[in-house]
Amino acid sequence: QVQLVESGGGLVQAGGSLRLSCAASGSTFTITAIGWYRQAPGKQRELVATITRGDSTNYADSVKGRFTISRDNAKNTVYLQMNSLKPEDTAVYYCNAATWIKGTTKNYWGQGAQVTVSS
C-alpha cells in the first residue's frame, strides 16, 4: 500500500507560479513512476507530468517549458513547479503512483489539490 498526500494548491493570477508537493508513504519501494494528473470541470483526467524510478520525465505538450517535475528521494516527495500559469491550467491536480510488486501493477491516487488560475 502507498499513501499520497498533496499540498500546495491555491489561487494565482495568470502568469504566476505555484508548487505542488506530493508526499508518499507506505511501500514506497514499490513505486516505479510517480507524477501528476489533472482534471478540469467537465473534462477527462489527463497526464501532466511523470518521473520514473530511473529519473526519466514525461510532460504533456501543454505544459512543456512551463512545468517541472522533480523529487526528493530522502523525503519521498515529488514536486511540480508550475510557472507561467494560464487560466486553462485550472483543475484539480492529482498525484499518482504506479507500483509493481511480484508481477502485479497498481495505481494509487492522492486526494487532489485545487489549482485556480485567474485571468
Image (cartoon, helix red, strand yellow):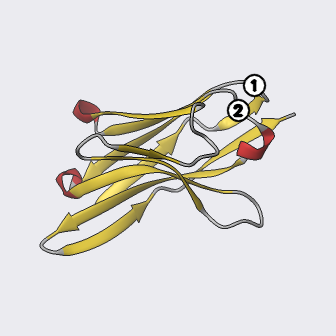
Left or right? Give the position of 89 relative to 70: right
Residue nearest the viewer, comparing 107 with 50: 50
Name which residue lies at 30% across and 58% down. Answer: 2
Write the residue at 60% across / 31% down. 66
Using the image as rendered, state which of residue 93 and residue 63 is in the foreground: 63
In the displayed structure, would residue 71 be above or below residue 98?
Answer: above
* Badge 1 amino acid: Gly
Q: Residues within 10 Å of mark 2 (few under 14, many from 20)?
A: many
> Are the residues flagged by discs 2 and 1 in contact, CB closer than 8 Å?
yes
Mark number, residue 85: 2
Q: How many marks?
A: 2
Image position, residue 93 (x, y; %): 59, 50
Q: Is residue 65 left or right of residue 69?
A: right
- Up/down of 90 relative to 20, above or below: below
How far across and how far down the image is residue 105, in percent?
A: 27, 71
Residue 15's disc number = 1
Residue visible at 83% across and 35% down in the picture: 118
